[in-house]
């Protein structure tokens, strides 16, 4: 079981990516997701917060990084960062046996 993923989680992770150099965004994204998972496992095992990653939520894990101010979705870099977060969520949900997207939106 995982923590629910809320819109605030997505925007906070996207803001962390936006503040990171373009070439490091993939690594930051992976670290946030893996850190949140490590924190969730510690919470379940020991009933306490992870010292670096917090409570197991994506927002708490993302707050370990510098956050850019939240722009609007017509800011293309922010939009790309948000899409990265959503695609990673979909990938991880599909790997965990959750329901993935029925169709690839890039295919006609």
Image: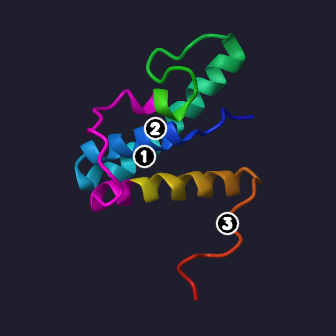
Q: CA distance from mark 1 to mark 2?
A: 5 Å
Q: Is residue 93 left or right of residue 75?
A: right
**Label 2 secondary element:** helix
Q: Callout 3: few (<14), some (14-19), or many (20+) C-alpha neighbours within 10 Å?
A: few
> Which is nearer the N-term, disc 3 or disc 2?
2
Q: Is residue 67 left or right of residue 8?
A: left
Q: Which mark is residue 32?
A: 2
Q: Is residue 98 magenta?
A: no
- Residue picked out by circle 3: 101
Q: Report if the CB atoms under discs 1 and 2 are less than 8 Å apart.
A: yes
Measured from the top left, where is residue 90 in percent x and y?
A: 61, 57
Q: Secondary structure at mark 3?
A: loop
- Furthest residue toward left: 21
Residue drawn at 50 percent across, 20 percent down = 54
State the residue lying farthest toward the bottom: 108
The residue tagged with tag 1: helix, strand or loop?
A: helix
Characterize the magenta stretch by its predominant secondary structure. Answer: loop
* Dot in front, 3 or 2: 3
Magenta span includes 75: yes
Horizontal and vertical percent for residue 18? Answer: 29, 47
The boundaries of the magenta stretch are 61-81
Q: Against 4, is 74 above or below?
A: below
- With 92 as the anchor, is 58 left or right in this view? left
Q: Residue at x 77, y 54 (%)?
A: 97
Nearest the viewer among 73 and 34 is 73
Task: Name the residue carrying label 1.
Answer: 29
Give me the C-alpha separation between circle 3 and circle 1. Answer: 20 Å
In percent of the image, x 67 and y 52: which residue is there?
93
Q: Is residue 88 left or right of residue 18?
A: right
């Amino acid at each position: 079981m995982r923590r629910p993923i809320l819109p605030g989680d997505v925007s906070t992770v996207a803001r962390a990516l936006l503040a990171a150099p373009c070439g490091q965004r993939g690594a930051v994204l992976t670290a946030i997701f893996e850190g949140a998972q490590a924190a969730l496992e510690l919470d379940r095992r020991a009933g306490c917060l992870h010292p670096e990653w917090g409570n197991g939520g994506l927002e708490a894990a993302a707050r370990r990084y510098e956050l850019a101010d939240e722009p609007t979705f017509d800011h293309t870099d922010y939009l790309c960062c948000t899409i990265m977060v959503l695609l990673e969520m979909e990938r991880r949900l599909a790997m965990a046996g959750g329901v993935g997207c029925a169709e690839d939106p890039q295919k006609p």
